[in-house]
């Protein structure tokens, strides 16, 4: 199973729109991919699913993670790094079997001009710790608010070229 993680719990996020774009492109290449949005996490996760606890609400999410072999994380820049909810989510998942010896591609987005370069680097360190192999080509999309059209698709030539290259490499990875 292949899963895109929309790595924020902010409602109506550009992260989710970008995740949808990647999903559409992967499905168009016959590469079945689901989206797991962190907006669907249990709202009291820090009470119910950390440190060995497991709620009935989180269990189906854990099951998706357990079944997934390849992840694609779309990660917004929050305060110069990746969102805290993404780390909390990783901390809630079973260790080490959730991620160890699996693969991941990373996409950083931001409204500012850096496309979450630093946050994607920070998250790469976390991935390596938990045993997730990170694909070398990581994509950064700055000024995301100007990148998606009314149908939620990327439309700028350069952005399409680099994201499609990453998508094709991800399928083979
Ligand atoms: C808590 C928070 C912190 C943010 N910090 C940054 C930042 O450090 N740099 C930046 O370029 N954008 C920052 N942003 C703006 C996001 O990059 C912007 O909202 C973008 O659309 C991606 O996030 P989204 O998926 O929540 O829409 C921040 C947004 C939030 C909600």
Image (tube, helix red, strand yellow):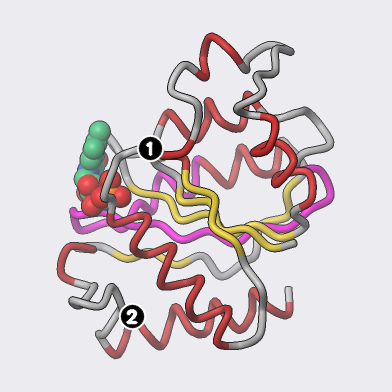
Q: What residue sits right under mark 2 in the picture?
A: 159
Q: What residue sits right under mark 1 in the picture?
A: 9
32 over 90 or under it: above or below: below
Mark 2 or 1: the one toward you? 1
Residue 111 colored in magenta in the image: yes
Image spot of residue 75 (x, y percent): 42, 50
In this view, the residue in front, 134 or 89, is: 89
11 over 23 or under it: above or below: above
Q: How crowded is mark 2: few (under 14 residues within 10 Å), some or many (20 or more)?
A: some
Query: In this image, 127 relative to 159: left or right?
Result: right
Image spot of residue 14 (x, y percent): 28, 56
Identify the residue at image location x=53%, y=42%.
Answer: 123
Q: Quadrant of the C terminus?
A: bottom right
Instruction: Write down the region rendered in magenta.
Output: 99-122
Q: How crowded is mark 1: few (under 14 residues within 10 Å), some or many (20 or more)?
A: some
- Distance from the alpha carbon under mark 2 to that under mark 1: 25 Å
Identify the residue at image location x=58%, y=47%.
Answer: 124
Image spot of residue 172 (x, y percent): 73, 80
In this view, the residue in front, 164 or 153, is: 153
For ligand 1, the image quadrant comes to top left
Query: In this image, 170 relative to 78: left or right?
Result: right
Identify the residue at image location x=44%, y=30%.
Answer: 85
Query: In this image, 64 relative to 11: left or right?
Result: right
Residue 57 colored in magenta in the image: no
Q: Quadrant of the N terminus?
A: bottom right
Q: Quadrant of residue 111?
A: bottom left
């Amino acid at each position: 199973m292949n899963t895109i993680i929309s790595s924020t719990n902010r409602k109506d996020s550009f992260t989710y729109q970008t995740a949808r774009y990647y999903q559409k492109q992967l499905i168009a290449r016959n590469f079945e991919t689901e989206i797991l949005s962190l907006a669907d996490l249990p709202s009291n996760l820090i009470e119910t699913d950390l440190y060995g606890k497991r709620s009935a609400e989180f269990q189906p999410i854990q099951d998706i993670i357990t079944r997934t072999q390849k992840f694609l994380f779309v990660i917004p820049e929050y305060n110069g790094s990746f969102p805290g909810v993404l780390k909390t989510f990783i901390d809630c998942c079973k260790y080490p079997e959730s991620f160890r010896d699996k693969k991941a591609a990373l996409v950083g987005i931001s409204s500012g001009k850096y496309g979450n370069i630093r946050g994607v680097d920070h998250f790469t360190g976390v991935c390596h710790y938990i045993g997730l192999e990170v694909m070398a080509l990581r994509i950064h999309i700055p000024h995301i608010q100007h990148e998606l059209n009314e149908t939620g698709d990327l439309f700028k030539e350069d952005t399409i070229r680099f994201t499609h290259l990453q998508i094709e490499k991800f399928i083979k990875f």
